[in-house]
């Protein structure tokens, strides 16, 4: 009597000292995985199954036969989320007879890093008859709580070379965005893609930004395309990544899968002729701070590309996190937190720089001083929260009128603007400011301004504007003595 395929494979894998199983894999006419059954498992796999998926239940004193009944003959996605990338690996190993080794961040799914090893398993003649639509592959894995850098760095020479080149580019002396642009172009070329984009993402501020892109297609830039994409779409990527370390769409079947999960996003992909896509998150301290977005890549190299971009994402994450930290520091040191306009520190630095430039190369400029009349009485009568609201309202009016100029909060209730508008344009803005800031019971600006046509003396112009503002303020208090500070 012929030995059964099951018994033969069972003896084979029980010789391994790490968790192992053999998959029976079926595919359709398009090469897509339709079945991935756990055909047989070894003893180590059974223990690992209890520890990983059953919370350690009876892991030390388990019933081997009961665990086998639970898993053997079932699809792997009966026990964990189905992963289209893993489906592809099974097809490659079982049907294309490839040897595959990957090291994957699955901490979001299982709390472990996973080292996966897949080998094709040839059917032995003389065993019980094998179905014609099935091929087999061996699957082994190890789990690590923390990333094992030795395993993660065990990559092929061409991947190592590309990663080292990327790291060197990121660590050179060039300006950050210049280096990021070069790296993005290198990634696009390496993946054979039509477009590669680096995106920063701030969930708390509810915004995202394209900071680098490279594209072959002659259509709109990524900034133009993404300007029509609401934040909610990008925010939705985080939900899709809860059970995988990256999204890879390689064909219409994958598109259809994600269409069922995020129809509005995939509708946008189709409108922008996206046939394949890699989306890799940049994760810093457990939070997504950005994405690497690769459109229409070489799908014949999925495994190599996936391994490369996952590794590169670590180095990109470090650089982007540092860049975002420095940008936040600069913002905090230059922006008034209450009103959102620039603060006195920023004004002092800018004035020093502009004063020198205007002295060396004079050109016409304007200075405007805007002080809030009656702020003290509002603080006294309505509390400081009312005073803060008045300051914010004043800043909003100035930001709306002086859209292209830098606005500084020079002191408690004083704002300063330095503008290079022509005389008529600036005076028109001053007139609008007077009209919108003329409520004696709330927002009322004391305004002083000065235009320098030829001298280029910025500090003198600021003094003249300040003196004019105080004259205007005195007129207000003559008319409204009850509001005098």
Image: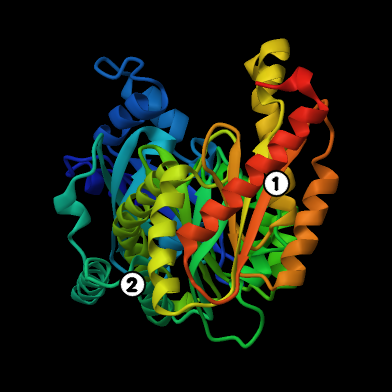
State the mark number for residue 179. Answer: 2
Q: Are marks 2 and 1 in contact (CB under 8 Å)?
A: no
- Residue 357: x percent and y percent? 41, 72
State the mark number for residue 183. Answer: none
- Residue 425: x percent and y percent? 75, 68
**Left or right, 5 with reference to 331:** left
State the CA–CA distance, disc 2 to disc 1.
45 Å
Residue at x 29%, y 27% (from the top left corner): 47
Image position of 59 with respect to 206: above or below: above
- Going from the N terminus, do you reach mark 2 or mark 1 first? 2
Mark 2: which secondary structure?
A: helix
Evaluate whether residue 168 shows in this view: yes
Residue at x 49%, y 59% (from the top left corner): 460
Report which residue position mark 1 lands on.
447
Instruction: Classify mark 1: residues with Cα within 10 Å, few (<14), some (14-19) or many (20+).
Output: many
User: How many marks overall?
Assistant: 2
- Residue 303: x percent and y percent? 38, 67
Residue at x 45%, y 82% (from the top left corner): 192
- Residue 248: x percent and y percent? 51, 61
């Amino acid at each position: 009597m012929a030995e059964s395929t099951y018994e033969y494979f069972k003896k084979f894998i029980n010789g391994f000292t790490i968790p192992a199983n053999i998959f029976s894999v079926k595919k359709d006419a398009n090469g897509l995985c339709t079945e991935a059954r756990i055909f047989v498992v070894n003893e180590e796999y059974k223990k690992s199954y209890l520890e990983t998926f059953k919370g350690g239940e009876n892991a030390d004193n388990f019933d081997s036969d009961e665990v086998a009944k639970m898993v053997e003959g079932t699809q792997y996605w009966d026990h964990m989320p189905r992963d289209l990338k893993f489906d592809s690996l099974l097809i490659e190993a079982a049907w294309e007879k490839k040897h595959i080794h990957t090291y994957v961040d699955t901490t979001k799914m299982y709390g472990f890093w996973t080292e996966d090893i897949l080998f094709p398993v040839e059917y032995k003649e003389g065993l019980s008859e094998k179905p014609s639509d099935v091929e087999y592959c061996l699957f082994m894995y190890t789990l690590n709580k923390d990333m094992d850098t030795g395993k993660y760095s065990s990559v092929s020479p061409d991947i190592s070379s590309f990663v080292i080149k990327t790291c060197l580019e990121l660590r050179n002396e060039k300006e950050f965005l210049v280096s990021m642009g070069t790296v993005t172009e290198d990634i696009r070329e390496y993946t054979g893609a039509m477009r590669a984009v680096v995106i920063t993402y701030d969930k708390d501020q509810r915004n995202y930004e394209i900071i680098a892109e490279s594209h072959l297609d002659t259509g709109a830039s990524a900034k133009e395309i993404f300007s029509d994409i609401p934040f909610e779409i990008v925010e939705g990527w985080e939900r899709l990544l809860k059970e995988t370390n990256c999204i890879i769409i390689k064909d219409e079947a994958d598109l259809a899968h994600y269409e069922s999960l995020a129809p509005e996003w995939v509708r946008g992909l189709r409108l922008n002729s996206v046939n394949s896509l890699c989306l890799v998150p940049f994760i810093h301290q457990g939070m997504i701070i950005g994405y690497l977005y690769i459109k229409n890549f070489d799908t014949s190299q999925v495994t190599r590309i996936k391994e490369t971009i996952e590794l590169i994402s670590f180095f990109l994450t470090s650089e982007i996190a540092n860049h975002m930290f420095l940008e936040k520091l600069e913002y905090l040191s230059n922006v008034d937190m209450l009103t959102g306009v620039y603060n006195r520190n920023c004004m002092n630095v800018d004035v020093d720089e502009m004063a020198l430039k205007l002295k060396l190369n004079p050109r016409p400029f304007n200075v405007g001083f805007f002080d809030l009349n009656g702020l003290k009485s509002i603080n006294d009568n309505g509390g400081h929260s009312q005073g803060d609201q008045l300051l914010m309202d004043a800043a909003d009016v100035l930001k709306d009128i002086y859209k292209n100029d830098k606005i500084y909060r020079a002191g408690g209730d004083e704002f300063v603007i330095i503008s290079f508008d022509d005389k008529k344009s600036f005076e028109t803005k001053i007139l609008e400011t007077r009209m919108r800031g003329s409520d004696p019971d709330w927002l009322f600006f004391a305004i002083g301004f000065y235009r320098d046509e030829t001298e280029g003396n910025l500090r003198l112009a600021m003094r003249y504007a300040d003196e004019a503002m105080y004259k205007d303020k005195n007129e207000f208090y003559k008319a409204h003595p009850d509001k005098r500070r």
